[in-house]
Image (cartoon, rainbow, N blue to C red):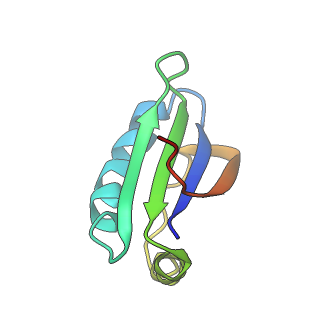
Amino acid sequence: MSVRLIISIQAAAGKGNELLAAYRDRCLDIAKEPGCLQFEVFQSGLDPDRLTLLELWKDDAALAVHAEVNKTRAPLPPGLRADGASREDYVYSRVS
């Protein structure tokens, strides 16, 4: 069953555009991973320092592989993120 992740990210004050740019390349790379159905970052239209990352994985196994690959990725540039992020996991079940 598919797994949806919704991750809220707060950029450091005034760094939202820089953080968004840093995530763009990462999103393109991760979207190529097996089992990745969506990996996109969105910037709030009301607060440019607020980003939301939407992930959709084919199943738990694909997400687990992604988590292992993530351990080898270079970190994002320092100073772009504020402390704290929240993550919500959902079992993806589309309602018609």
Residue 25 spot, x, y in % from top left:
29, 55
Residue 73 spot, x, y in % from top left:
43, 74
Q: Residue at x 54, y 54 (%)?
A: 93
Residue 63 spot, x, y in % from top left:
51, 74
Q: Residue at x 35, y 61 (%)?
A: 37
Residue 66 drawn above or below residue 85: below
Left or right: residue 20 versus residue 94 is left
The foreground one among 64 and 79 is: 64
Residue 57 spot, x, y in % from top left:
45, 66
Left or right: residue 38 versus residue 88 is left
Number of callouts: 0
Which residue sits furthest front?
96
State whether residue 43 appears in this view. Answer: yes
State whether residue 76 appears in this view. Answer: no
Q: Residue at x 48, y 48 (%)?
A: 54
Residue 81 drawn above or below residue 78: above
Which residue sits furthest top?
46
Residue 47 drawn above or below residue 4: above
